[in-house]
Image (cartoon, grey):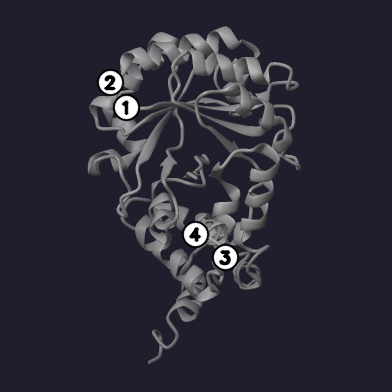
Amino acid sequence: MKLILAPMEGVIDADLRALLTAVGGYDACVSEFVRVSERPPPPRVLLRHCPELRQGGRTASGTPVILQLLGGDAHLLAESAASAAELGAPGIDLNFGCPSKTVNRRDGGAILLRSPARIQAIVAAVRAAVPAAVPVSAKLRLGFEDASLALDNAQAAASGGADLLTIHARTRADGYRAPARWEQLAAIRAALTIPLVANGDISSAARYAECRRVSGCADAMLGRGAVARPDLARQIRSAEQGEGSAPMEWDAVAALLCQLAQRMAHHAEPRWVMPRLKQWLNMLAPNYPEAAACFAAVRGEREPTRLLRLLTEAAYPGALAV
Protein backbone atom coordinates (compact mmCIF):
# COMPACT_ATOMS: atom_id res chain seq x y z
CA MET A 1 0.00 0.00 0.00
CA LYS A 2 1.31 3.41 -1.04
CA LEU A 3 -0.25 6.67 0.09
CA ILE A 4 0.56 9.78 -1.91
CA LEU A 5 -0.23 13.37 -1.00
CA ALA A 6 -1.97 14.98 -3.96
CA PRO A 7 -1.10 18.25 -5.66
CA MET A 8 -3.74 20.94 -5.11
CA GLU A 9 -3.00 24.30 -6.71
CA GLY A 10 -3.22 27.07 -4.16
CA VAL A 11 -3.85 24.65 -1.30
CA ILE A 12 -1.20 21.96 -0.90
CA ASP A 13 2.00 23.87 -1.51
CA ALA A 14 5.49 23.36 -0.06
CA ASP A 15 4.43 24.69 3.34
CA LEU A 16 1.50 22.30 3.66
CA ARG A 17 3.53 19.42 2.22
CA ALA A 18 6.09 19.95 4.98
CA LEU A 19 3.45 20.01 7.71
CA LEU A 20 1.34 17.07 6.49
CA THR A 21 4.28 14.78 5.72
CA ALA A 22 5.70 15.54 9.17
CA VAL A 23 2.46 14.21 10.67
CA GLY A 24 3.34 10.99 8.86
CA GLY A 25 1.99 8.15 6.77
CA TYR A 26 2.92 9.31 3.26
CA ASP A 27 5.20 7.48 0.85
CA ALA A 28 5.47 10.45 -1.51
CA CYS A 29 3.82 13.71 -2.49
CA VAL A 30 3.38 15.56 -5.77
CA SER A 31 4.10 19.24 -6.33
CA GLU A 32 1.64 21.78 -7.70
CA PHE A 33 1.86 21.68 -11.48
CA VAL A 34 4.48 23.63 -13.40
CA ARG A 35 2.85 24.94 -16.58
CA VAL A 36 4.89 24.31 -19.74
CA SER A 37 3.67 26.32 -22.72
CA GLU A 38 5.92 28.29 -25.07
CA ARG A 39 9.30 27.22 -23.67
CA PRO A 40 10.70 25.00 -20.93
CA PRO A 41 10.59 26.77 -17.56
CA PRO A 42 13.99 27.87 -16.23
CA PRO A 43 15.38 26.24 -13.08
CA ARG A 44 14.21 29.17 -10.91
CA VAL A 45 10.60 28.44 -11.86
CA LEU A 46 10.98 24.73 -11.07
CA LEU A 47 12.53 25.65 -7.73
CA ARG A 48 9.72 28.08 -6.96
CA HIS A 49 7.08 25.40 -7.48
CA CYS A 50 9.13 22.70 -5.80
CA PRO A 51 11.59 24.28 -3.33
CA GLU A 52 12.25 20.81 -1.93
CA LEU A 53 14.61 20.36 -4.90
CA ARG A 54 17.08 22.41 -2.85
CA GLN A 55 17.09 19.63 -0.24
CA GLY A 56 17.34 16.51 -2.35
CA GLY A 57 13.76 16.54 -3.59
CA ARG A 58 12.33 15.70 -0.16
CA THR A 59 10.36 17.43 2.55
CA ALA A 60 12.10 18.10 5.86
CA SER A 61 10.69 14.81 7.17
CA GLY A 62 12.24 12.89 4.25
CA THR A 63 9.19 12.33 2.01
CA PRO A 64 10.01 12.43 -1.74
CA VAL A 65 8.34 15.22 -3.74
CA ILE A 66 7.51 14.27 -7.32
CA LEU A 67 7.56 17.28 -9.64
CA GLN A 68 4.42 17.65 -11.77
CA LEU A 69 4.43 19.14 -15.27
CA LEU A 70 1.40 20.30 -17.26
CA GLY A 71 1.24 21.01 -20.98
CA GLY A 72 0.51 19.56 -24.39
CA ASP A 73 3.82 19.79 -26.25
CA ALA A 74 5.77 16.54 -25.92
CA HIS A 75 9.10 18.10 -26.87
CA LEU A 76 8.83 20.96 -24.36
CA LEU A 77 7.65 18.64 -21.61
CA ALA A 78 10.58 16.32 -22.29
CA GLU A 79 13.06 19.20 -22.03
CA SER A 80 11.40 20.39 -18.84
CA ALA A 81 11.50 16.92 -17.32
CA ALA A 82 15.18 16.57 -18.15
CA SER A 83 15.89 19.90 -16.43
CA ALA A 84 13.91 18.83 -13.36
CA ALA A 85 15.80 15.54 -13.20
CA GLU A 86 19.10 17.42 -13.35
CA LEU A 87 17.94 19.48 -10.37
CA GLY A 88 17.35 16.27 -8.44
CA ALA A 89 13.63 15.62 -8.83
CA PRO A 90 12.99 12.09 -7.51
CA GLY A 91 10.23 11.61 -10.09
CA ILE A 92 8.23 13.34 -12.81
CA ASP A 93 4.43 13.37 -12.89
CA LEU A 94 2.41 14.47 -15.93
CA ASN A 95 -0.91 16.23 -15.40
CA PHE A 96 -3.66 14.99 -17.73
CA GLY A 97 -6.43 15.68 -15.24
CA CYS A 98 -6.73 19.38 -14.47
CA PRO A 99 -10.35 20.41 -15.24
CA SER A 100 -9.71 24.17 -15.39
CA LYS A 101 -11.28 25.71 -18.49
CA THR A 102 -8.36 28.12 -18.81
CA VAL A 103 -5.83 25.29 -18.64
CA ASN A 104 -7.83 23.16 -21.08
CA ARG A 105 -8.14 26.03 -23.59
CA ARG A 106 -4.35 26.27 -23.55
CA ASP A 107 -3.90 22.61 -24.44
CA GLY A 108 -3.17 21.34 -20.96
CA GLY A 109 -4.67 19.03 -18.37
CA ALA A 110 -7.86 17.09 -19.03
CA ILE A 111 -8.22 18.25 -22.65
CA LEU A 112 -5.59 15.64 -23.55
CA LEU A 113 -7.95 12.88 -22.41
CA ARG A 114 -9.60 13.26 -25.80
CA SER A 115 -6.49 11.83 -27.50
CA PRO A 116 -4.87 8.64 -26.18
CA ALA A 117 -2.23 8.92 -28.94
CA ARG A 118 -1.07 12.28 -27.61
CA ILE A 119 -0.90 10.95 -24.07
CA GLN A 120 1.26 8.07 -25.25
CA ALA A 121 3.54 10.41 -27.21
CA ILE A 122 4.01 12.79 -24.29
CA VAL A 123 4.74 10.05 -21.79
CA ALA A 124 7.16 8.37 -24.20
CA ALA A 125 9.03 11.63 -24.84
CA VAL A 126 9.39 12.36 -21.14
CA ARG A 127 10.38 8.78 -20.36
CA ALA A 128 13.15 8.98 -22.96
CA ALA A 129 14.37 12.33 -21.66
CA VAL A 130 15.04 11.40 -18.04
CA PRO A 131 17.36 8.79 -16.52
CA ALA A 132 15.92 5.31 -16.11
CA ALA A 133 16.23 5.65 -12.33
CA VAL A 134 13.78 8.59 -12.33
CA PRO A 135 10.21 7.26 -12.36
CA VAL A 136 7.64 8.84 -14.66
CA SER A 137 3.98 8.83 -13.63
CA ALA A 138 0.78 10.32 -15.00
CA LYS A 139 -2.36 11.73 -13.37
CA LEU A 140 -5.58 11.21 -15.34
CA ARG A 141 -9.33 11.42 -14.92
CA LEU A 142 -11.82 8.90 -16.24
CA GLY A 143 -12.30 11.07 -19.30
CA PHE A 144 -13.28 14.48 -20.62
CA GLU A 145 -17.02 14.45 -21.37
CA ASP A 146 -17.48 10.78 -20.45
CA ALA A 147 -15.46 7.70 -19.51
CA SER A 148 -15.49 6.00 -22.93
CA LEU A 149 -11.72 6.45 -23.37
CA ALA A 150 -10.72 5.69 -19.78
CA LEU A 151 -9.06 2.37 -20.51
CA ASP A 152 -7.55 3.62 -23.78
CA ASN A 153 -5.95 6.59 -22.02
CA ALA A 154 -4.59 4.44 -19.20
CA GLN A 155 -3.12 1.93 -21.62
CA ALA A 156 -1.66 4.74 -23.74
CA ALA A 157 0.17 6.16 -20.73
CA ALA A 158 1.40 2.72 -19.75
CA SER A 159 2.61 1.88 -23.25
CA GLY A 160 4.40 5.24 -23.35
CA GLY A 161 6.51 4.05 -20.44
CA ALA A 162 4.77 5.36 -17.33
CA ASP A 163 5.85 3.57 -14.18
CA LEU A 164 2.65 4.40 -12.30
CA LEU A 165 -0.76 5.93 -13.00
CA THR A 166 -3.14 7.83 -10.80
CA ILE A 167 -6.77 8.17 -11.87
CA HIS A 168 -9.17 10.62 -10.29
CA ALA A 169 -12.39 8.64 -10.55
CA ARG A 170 -14.39 11.42 -12.18
CA THR A 171 -14.52 12.89 -15.67
CA ARG A 172 -13.66 16.48 -16.44
CA ALA A 173 -17.38 17.12 -16.89
CA ASP A 174 -17.98 15.79 -13.36
CA GLY A 175 -15.68 18.41 -11.87
CA TYR A 176 -15.52 17.58 -8.17
CA ARG A 177 -19.13 16.51 -7.73
CA ALA A 178 -19.69 13.46 -5.57
CA PRO A 179 -19.49 10.61 -5.78
CA ALA A 180 -16.20 9.49 -7.26
CA ARG A 181 -16.81 6.41 -9.41
CA TRP A 182 -14.32 4.02 -7.88
CA GLU A 183 -16.00 1.00 -9.45
CA GLN A 184 -14.81 2.13 -12.88
CA LEU A 185 -11.19 1.78 -11.78
CA ALA A 186 -11.45 -1.99 -11.27
CA ALA A 187 -11.35 -2.98 -14.96
CA ILE A 188 -8.55 -0.51 -15.65
CA ARG A 189 -6.46 -1.86 -12.80
CA ALA A 190 -6.99 -5.42 -14.04
CA ALA A 191 -5.84 -4.47 -17.54
CA LEU A 192 -2.61 -2.77 -16.45
CA THR A 193 0.73 -4.25 -15.49
CA ILE A 194 1.83 -1.11 -13.66
CA PRO A 195 0.44 0.18 -10.35
CA LEU A 196 -2.82 2.14 -10.41
CA VAL A 197 -3.43 4.72 -7.69
CA ALA A 198 -7.04 5.60 -6.82
CA ASN A 199 -7.97 9.23 -6.21
CA GLY A 200 -11.18 11.01 -5.30
CA ASP A 201 -13.44 11.20 -2.21
CA ILE A 202 -11.05 9.34 0.10
CA SER A 203 -11.81 11.34 3.22
CA SER A 204 -11.45 8.81 6.05
CA ALA A 205 -9.99 5.40 6.82
CA ALA A 206 -13.43 3.88 6.24
CA ARG A 207 -13.69 5.58 2.84
CA TYR A 208 -10.24 4.29 1.91
CA ALA A 209 -11.27 0.75 2.83
CA GLU A 210 -14.41 1.07 0.68
CA CYS A 211 -12.43 2.47 -2.24
CA ARG A 212 -9.95 -0.39 -1.99
CA ARG A 213 -12.76 -2.94 -1.92
CA VAL A 214 -14.60 -1.45 -4.89
CA SER A 215 -11.67 -0.49 -7.11
CA GLY A 216 -9.16 -3.16 -6.16
CA CYS A 217 -6.54 -0.42 -5.76
CA ALA A 218 -4.44 -0.67 -2.62
CA ASP A 219 -2.58 2.55 -3.47
CA ALA A 220 -4.32 5.89 -2.98
CA MET A 221 -3.74 9.59 -3.53
CA LEU A 222 -5.17 11.85 -0.84
CA GLY A 223 -6.10 15.47 -1.52
CA ARG A 224 -8.94 17.36 0.13
CA GLY A 225 -9.35 14.59 2.70
CA ALA A 226 -5.74 15.04 3.75
CA VAL A 227 -6.23 18.76 4.35
CA ALA A 228 -9.47 18.19 6.24
CA ARG A 229 -7.90 15.44 8.37
CA PRO A 230 -4.16 16.16 8.76
CA ASP A 231 -3.55 12.66 10.12
CA LEU A 232 -5.60 10.86 7.42
CA ALA A 233 -2.67 8.84 6.05
CA ARG A 234 -1.69 7.77 9.54
CA GLN A 235 -5.31 6.83 10.31
CA ILE A 236 -5.51 4.70 7.16
CA ARG A 237 -2.31 2.85 7.99
CA SER A 238 -3.44 2.15 11.54
CA ALA A 239 -6.80 0.84 10.34
CA GLU A 240 -5.19 -1.39 7.71
CA GLN A 241 -2.94 -2.87 10.38
CA GLY A 242 -5.97 -3.56 12.56
CA GLU A 243 -4.88 -1.07 15.16
CA GLY A 244 -7.00 1.58 16.80
CA SER A 245 -5.65 5.12 16.56
CA ALA A 246 -7.28 8.17 18.09
CA PRO A 247 -7.78 11.01 15.62
CA MET A 248 -5.60 14.06 15.96
CA GLU A 249 -6.99 16.38 18.63
CA TRP A 250 -7.81 20.01 17.98
CA ASP A 251 -4.82 21.29 19.96
CA ALA A 252 -2.44 19.47 17.62
CA VAL A 253 -4.31 20.78 14.57
CA ALA A 254 -4.20 24.31 15.98
CA ALA A 255 -0.45 23.92 16.36
CA LEU A 256 -0.18 23.03 12.66
CA LEU A 257 -2.07 26.21 11.76
CA CYS A 258 0.33 28.22 13.89
CA GLN A 259 3.25 26.54 12.16
CA LEU A 260 1.79 27.40 8.75
CA ALA A 261 1.68 31.07 9.74
CA GLN A 262 5.26 30.89 10.98
CA ARG A 263 6.46 29.27 7.77
CA MET A 264 4.66 31.80 5.60
CA ALA A 265 6.21 34.67 7.54
CA HIS A 266 9.59 33.72 6.04
CA HIS A 267 8.60 34.00 2.38
CA ALA A 268 5.09 35.41 1.86
CA GLU A 269 3.62 38.88 2.15
CA PRO A 270 1.71 39.34 5.42
CA ARG A 271 -1.54 39.96 3.52
CA TRP A 272 -1.53 36.33 2.30
CA VAL A 273 -1.32 34.74 5.75
CA MET A 274 -4.92 35.31 6.83
CA PRO A 275 -6.52 33.96 3.60
CA ARG A 276 -4.47 30.77 3.86
CA LEU A 277 -5.37 30.24 7.51
CA LYS A 278 -9.06 30.86 6.77
CA GLN A 279 -8.91 28.47 3.82
CA TRP A 280 -7.53 25.69 5.99
CA LEU A 281 -10.02 26.41 8.78
CA ASN A 282 -12.87 26.07 6.30
CA MET A 283 -11.59 22.73 5.08
CA LEU A 284 -11.10 21.50 8.66
CA ALA A 285 -14.52 22.64 9.86
CA PRO A 286 -16.51 19.46 8.95
CA ASN A 287 -14.24 17.42 11.22
CA TYR A 288 -13.34 20.03 13.83
CA PRO A 289 -16.13 22.27 15.23
CA GLU A 290 -13.39 24.36 16.82
CA ALA A 291 -12.14 25.31 13.37
CA ALA A 292 -15.59 26.56 12.40
CA ALA A 293 -15.77 28.56 15.63
CA CYS A 294 -12.37 30.13 15.00
CA PHE A 295 -13.41 31.09 11.49
CA ALA A 296 -16.66 32.62 12.70
CA ALA A 297 -14.79 34.64 15.33
CA VAL A 298 -12.46 36.26 12.77
CA ARG A 299 -14.60 36.16 9.63
CA GLY A 300 -14.36 39.87 8.85
CA GLU A 301 -10.77 40.41 9.95
CA ARG A 302 -7.86 40.81 7.56
CA GLU A 303 -4.99 40.62 10.02
CA PRO A 304 -4.18 37.24 11.60
CA THR A 305 -3.28 38.58 15.05
CA ARG A 306 -6.51 37.62 16.83
CA LEU A 307 -6.77 34.28 15.04
CA LEU A 308 -3.19 33.38 15.91
CA ARG A 309 -3.94 34.21 19.52
CA LEU A 310 -6.94 31.87 19.50
CA LEU A 311 -4.91 29.13 17.85
CA THR A 312 -1.97 29.58 20.20
CA GLU A 313 -4.23 29.38 23.25
CA ALA A 314 -5.68 26.13 21.90
CA ALA A 315 -2.34 24.62 20.92
CA TYR A 316 -0.23 25.79 23.84
CA PRO A 317 -2.46 26.46 26.87
CA GLY A 318 -0.99 29.12 29.12
CA ALA A 319 1.64 30.22 26.60
CA LEU A 320 0.13 33.69 26.35
CA ALA A 321 -0.44 34.13 30.08
CA VAL A 322 1.09 37.29 31.48
Separation of residues labelled 2 and 4 (CA atoms): 32 Å
Q: Amino acid at mark 2?
A: Pro
User: Are dots 1 and 4 in contact, CB under 8 Å?
Assistant: no
Disc tally is 4
Residue 145, image x, y percentages: 74, 21
Between disc 3 and disc 2, whose residue precedes?
Answer: 2
Between disc 3 and disc 4, whose residue precedes?
Answer: 4
Residue at the spot 32% in from the left edge and 27% down from the top edge? 134
Between disc 1 and disc 4, whose residue precedes?
Answer: 1
User: Are dots 2 and 4 in contact, CB under 8 Å?
Assistant: no
Say which residue label 4 marks: 234
User: Are dots 1 and 2 in contact, CB under 8 Å?
Assistant: yes
Separation of residues labelled 1 and 4 (CA atoms): 27 Å
Say which residue label 3 marks: 301
Tag 4: Cα neighbours inside 10 Å, few (<14), some, or many (≥20)? many
Say which residue label 1 marks: 134
Q: Which mark is residue 131?
A: 2
Separation of residues labelled 3 and 2 (CA atoms): 50 Å
Residue 43, image x, y percentages: 27, 27
Residue at the spot 75% in from the left edge and 40% down from the top edge? 177
Q: Amino acid at mark 3?
A: Glu
- Quadrant position of residue 297: bottom right
Residue 78, image x, y percentages: 37, 15
